[in-house]
Amino acid sequence: MEGAGMRVVIAEDDPLSRRILEATLEGRGYDVVVTSDGLQAWNVIRRHDGPALAVLDWMMPRMDGVEICRRLRASPASNSLYIILLTSRTSREDVVAGLDAGADDYIAKPFDPDELRARLRVGARVLDLQVSLAERVRELEEALAQVSQLRALLPICAYCKKIRNDRDYWEQIETYVMKHSGARFSHGICPECFTKYAEPELERAAHDVTHALEPKRRSSR
């Protein structure tokens, strides 16, 4: 369904308009929180599980919609809330004032239900993009942190190739890289090292086995 359970707060002091707003949004699947004045709306918005969307009447008792916008935009933690201002003030100056206060959109009263739904869909798309962007930024920050760690000057032993970590302990280079990049290692032997190290070890091992078996061969004759 269109609203998909997205929470939206409506703030309208007129009972009839409030009921129409509630019915319109619930009919489209939104999770609607209803308030009748600005202070109630403010308290709902400030909750830790507050709504993602808000439809606020401009003129309300105790706190009007424009004042709510100003307070929210003054707090960086509330900047993700998408606000639609509902107003009978349709002059150019009023519209500019509402948007300057921090509203993302506005609808003239009396509102058209189809227009309201369309503007809420726009708000939902904007919020989805913000979430996607925030996730992408987080991924990039993690990647940059890993790159910066691996590009730093690394104290490495010239003989055993161990790396001294931040706690002044020496550890294997693969252990250090795995901790700082998430990389994983599989061990093998390159041809050069096989010839230089592995073959002599195998020859010595074969010689030791032959030498150990020689007395048994002699005694069995």
Image: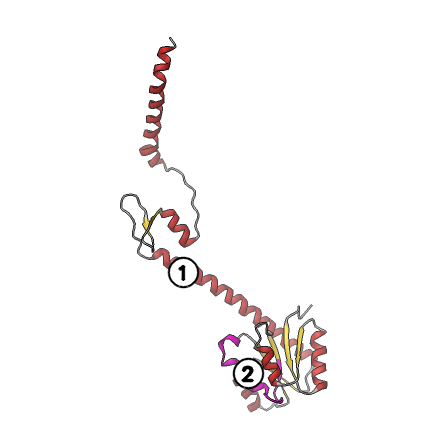
Q: Amino acid at mark 1?
A: Ala
- Residue 63 located within the stretch drawn in magenta: yes
Task: Tell me residue 80's x, y (percent).
Answer: 54, 74
Please provide the residue range marked out in magenta. Answer: 55-78
| Furthest residue toward top | 221
> Residue 151: which quarter of the image?
bottom left
In this view of the protein, which residue sits in the foreground, 122 or 37? 37
Task: Tell me residue 127's x, y (percent).
Answer: 57, 71
Using a 10 Å C-alpha cutoff, classify the residue at mark 2 as few (fewer than 14 neighbours), some (14 to 19) or many (20 or more).
Answer: many
> Residue 196: which quarter of the image?
top left
Residue under numbered circle 2: 69
Using a 10 Å C-alpha cutoff, classify the residue at mark 1 as few (fewer than 14 neighbours), some (14 to 19) or many (20 or more).
Answer: some
- Tell me the CA gap for discs 1 and 2: 36 Å
Q: At numbered mark 2, what does the secondary structure look like: helix, strand or loop?
A: helix
Q: At numbered mark 1, what does the secondary structure look like: helix, strand or loop?
A: helix
> Residue 111: which quarter of the image?
bottom right
Image vertical order of residue 149 relative to residue 57, above or below: above
| Furthest residue toward left | 158
Q: Amino acid at mark 2?
A: Cys
Counting every numbered tag in the picture gives 2
Identify the residue at image location x=40%, y=54%. Answer: 180
Residue under numbered circle 1: 145
